Image (tube, rainbow, N blue to C red):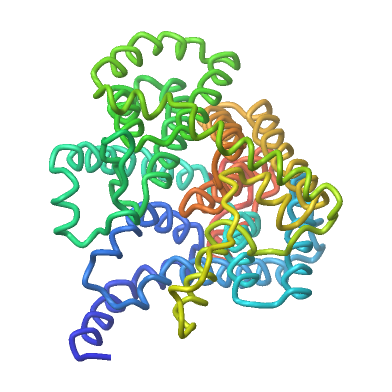
């Protein structure tokens, strides 16, 4: 390690230390930090920071989970009568899927399987931590503020990227065919992310979560400003040319409009105006069906091939994980140029799961994601006030993710996977508070009784 790198690491640690101490005291604060910083993780590709800093998010999640577990044990030790553990309904199939993936990794050990476990299931630790120590009402409101604010920032960066062009991005350190991509000759915006897919899915989630919250309280300045910039967010998302995000946003918005926000239907006119303002190449690329036709043939072949393999080919044998494994094998080979790519890119998370974990894994996944949507929807029915709009927005974002996964590897893309599971943890905190079964840190418990009024 060079002297400069060492000094940089020490300075970063000095700045991070107060936040670390705060997270140890109140783990949900760490989730807020994670939500605020995750959309900017792609900037590490061009930032002059030590390579070890790339693991900041994993380290923060471990700190959050460890702190939550410590507080959970302290609370249980102070209770004369143990509280019953009631996990949400989706925990059973998702837990079963994780167990199946772990068994697959044990049977077929290797770097690819370990990467598959990490990519597919690591961020499940976030809702687990929030189940132990939930968000309070103020923290949930702050999370919405963070998402709205960061959404506007990354949207503005994307618009600027369209103005400065690809050559300027190359001068910053981005690479062609990695971060810099084109569709019908149009630069696909990446904003502060490493690829256009993550950027588009993030804005999809921000709009679907933020709009119901803003519509429920239009007198608040924050919400008024957010509703004003929604067209900007939509335009920025489209410049990424990610059809899965457009499809997910459309399905989520239609569900919200049918649910109780009929005013969303009036957004059709401004969206048409936005479409007319976009370059022709962007519209052609977004609406093109050529790619979908090509992939549907691969999906049919995969379904027929895996129908007789109940446990699949093994975890980590397809998608981005297989690509990383292939690159590692090529680097270790004496003749990397002779290697022929055998990885299967489904661009459909359900087909990917079918190939890797077989029909059993696919059934568990479908069961699990269906229950996540039902969990958020039923929670929104039970609560009132700002939490009702937040739970409804999260349900819409979950529905959008389920839809987007049919034409993308949604849960394999960071930070899309992180925010999906994080928002489920938020729903859990809403459900916990609405049923008056709160968990407090020892300091909070000493200051007030565990009632809804304490929030």
Name the spot of residue 81 as percent of width and height, x first. Answer: 82, 62
Work out whether 258 lies above or below 16.
Answer: above
Judged left or right of residue 46, residue 342 is: right
Judged left or right of residue 356, residue 416 is: left
Judged left or right of residue 223, residue 427 is: right
Viewport quadrant of the N terminus: bottom left
Q: Residue lying at the far front in this picture: please name it.
A: 338
Examine the image and state in which quarter residue 204 appears. Answer: top left
Tell me what residue is drawn at x 77 percent, y 58 percent: 312
Asked whether the viewer can see residue 126, the reply is: yes
Question: Tag count in the figure?
Answer: 0
Examine the image and state in which quarter residue 277 appears. Answer: top left
Name the spot of residue 23 as percent of width and height, x first. Answer: 45, 66
- Foreground pick, 56 / 284: 284
Work out whether 337 lies above or below 259.
Answer: below
Asked whether the viewer can see residue 445, the reply is: no
Tell me what residue is drawn at x 29 percent, y 64 percent: 45
Tell me what residue is drawn at x 23 percent, y 66 percent: 47
Name the spot of residue 160 as percent of width and height, x first. Answer: 17, 40
Tell me what residue is drawn at x 47 percent, y 71 percent: 327
Work out whether 61 lies above or below 390.
Answer: below
- Foreground pick, 99 / 148: 99
Examine the image and state in which quarter residue 453 appears. Answer: top right
Name the spot of residue 32 as percent of width and height, x first. Answer: 43, 54
């Amino acid at each position: 390690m060079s002297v400069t790198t060492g000094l940089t690491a020490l300075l970063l640690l000095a700045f991070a230390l107060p936040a670390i101490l705060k997270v140890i005291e109140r783990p949900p604060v760490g989730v807020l930090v994670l939500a605020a910083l995750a959309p900017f993780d792609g900037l590490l590709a061009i930032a002059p920071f030590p390579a070890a800093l790339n693991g900041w998010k994993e380290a923060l999640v471990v700190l959050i989970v460890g702190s939550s577990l410590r507080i959970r044990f302290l609370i249980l030790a102070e209770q004369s009568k143990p509280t019953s553990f009631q996990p949400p309904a989706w925990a059973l199939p998702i837990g079963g899927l994780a167990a199946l993936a772990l068994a697959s990794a044990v049977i077929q050990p290797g770097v690819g399987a370990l990467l598959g476990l990490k990519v597919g299931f690591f961020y499940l630790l976030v809702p687990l931590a929030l189940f132990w120590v939930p968000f309070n009402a103020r923290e949930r409101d702050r999370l919405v503020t963070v998402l709205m604010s960061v959404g506007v920032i990354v949207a503005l960066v994307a618009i600027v990227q369209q103005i400065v062009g690809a050559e300027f991005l190359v001068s910053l350190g981005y690479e062609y065919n990695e971060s810099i991509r084109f569709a019908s000759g149009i630069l696909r915006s990446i904003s502060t992310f490493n690829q256009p897919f993550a950027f588009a899915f993030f804005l999809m989630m921000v709009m679907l979560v933020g709009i119901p919250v803003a519509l429920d309280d239009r007198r608040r300045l924050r919400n008024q400003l957010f509703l004003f910039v929604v067209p900007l967010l939509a335009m920025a998302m489209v410049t990424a040319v990610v059809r899965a995000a457009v499809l997910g946003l459309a399905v989520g918005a239609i569900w919200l409009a049918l649910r109780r926000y009929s005013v969303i239907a009036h957004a059709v006119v401004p969206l048409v105006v936005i479409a007319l303002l976009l370059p022709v190449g962007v519209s052609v690329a977004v609406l093109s069906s050529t790619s979908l036709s090509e992939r549907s043939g691969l999906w049919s072949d995969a379904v027929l091939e895996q129908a007789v393999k109940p446990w699949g080919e093994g975890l980590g044998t397809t998608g981005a994980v297989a690509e990383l494994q292939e690159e590692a094998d090529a680097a270790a080979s004496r003749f990397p140029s002779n290697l022929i790519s055998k990885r299967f890119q489904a661009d459909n998370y359900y087909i990917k799961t079918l190939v890797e974990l077989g029909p059993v894994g696919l059934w568990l996944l479908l069961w699990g994601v269906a229950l996540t949507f039902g969990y958020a929807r039923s929670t929104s029915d039970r609560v009132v006030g700002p939490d009702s709009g937040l739970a409804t927005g999260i349900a819409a974002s979950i529905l959008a993710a389920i839809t987007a996964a049919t034409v993308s590897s949604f849960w394999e893309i960071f930070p899309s996977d992180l925010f999906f599971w994080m928002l489920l943890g938020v729903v859990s905190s809403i459900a916990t508070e609405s049923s008056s079964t709160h968990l407090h840190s020892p300091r909070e418990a000493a200051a007030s009784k565990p009632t809804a009024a304490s929030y």
